[in-house]
Amino acid sequence: MKGPSSQRDLRKLLCELLRLFYAKEWVSGTGGGICSTVGKKAVLMAPTGVHKERVTPPDLFVVDPLSGDIIRPARNRSLRLSECNPIFCAIMSCRGAGSVMHSHALSAVLAADLAERSDHIVFQDLEMLKGLRGGSNLDKHPVPVIQNTTREPDLIEQVHEVISRTDFAKSYAILVRDHGAYIWGQDLWETKRHAEIYHFLFEATVARAQRYLRGGN
């Protein structure tokens, strides 16, 4: 699907997706976030600490994707840039992503729990794996699981470690224990698709685990 033709349209679309993600309970309680590249030298990024379903186009920041520095602040100067900023920039730089979203979905937290002491969880035997770029329903798809920290920027060292690992090269998500997930794509529309696919994988895998514990077949 073709992306927005102007920064104005991209700002509107990012706010529309935040409202959609809020309705799905992925960015409730002011948590979560989203960003998308504008050309090659700038990124539009949502603010932190605000109700994401109420973010408007002028509330978005323009950020340098390499340094994370603010190029243009939000019109409302009381707003603060997302604490996801260094993580979004790292994923875009190291994985060539054009867009990243951060989810606080309950299904992401419960899926990370299933990893137990492992540093990853494997999703398999699900048709929806086809929705990931290059994916097949025959895949055994590993997603890294990292430890939560008190502040979001403190996750950056763990993020750098897992996105550089070859065994996670086909993963477009990182699960954070007790917290949520980061999900990305080569552009905003692929990020939307990947977010929907991964949340289905989280929910299906958690439901299967619960059925198994109840003694189901």
Image (cartoon, grey):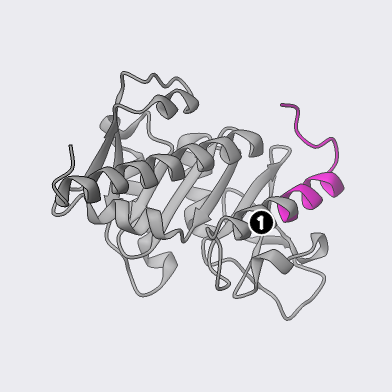
Q: Is residue 142 magenta?
A: no
Q: Is residue 171 visible?
A: yes
Q: Is residue 18 left or right of residue 168?
A: right
* Viewer-proximal residue among 53 and 155: 53
Magenta residues (range): 1-15
Badge 1 marks a residue whose secondary structure is helix
Q: Which residue is mark 1?
A: 18
Rendered view: 210 above or below 125:
below
Residue 163: x %, y % from top left: 36, 41
Residue 11: x %, y % from top left: 78, 52
Q: Residue at x 39, y 39 (%)?
A: 201
Q: Residue at x 58, y 72 (%)?
A: 30
Q: How many marks?
A: 1
Q: Residue at x 34, y 59 (%)?
A: 109
* Viewer-proximal residue among 127 and 82: 127
Q: Amino acid at mark 1?
A: Leu
Residue 211: x %, y % from top left: 23, 47
* Viewer-proximal residue among 43 and 174: 174
* Viewer-proximal residue among 165 and 29: 29
Q: Is residue 8 magenta?
A: yes
Q: Residue at x 73, y 81 (%)?
A: 78
Q: Is residue 58 left or right of residue 141?
A: right
Q: Which quarter of the rendering shows the C terminus?
A: top left
Q: Is residue 63 visible?
A: no
Question: Toward which corner of the image does residue 129 lie, by quadrant?
Answer: top left
Residue 4: x %, y % from top left: 80, 37
| Main secondary-structure element of the magenta-colored stretch | helix
Question: Toward which corner of the image does residue 180 lie, by quadrant?
Answer: bottom left
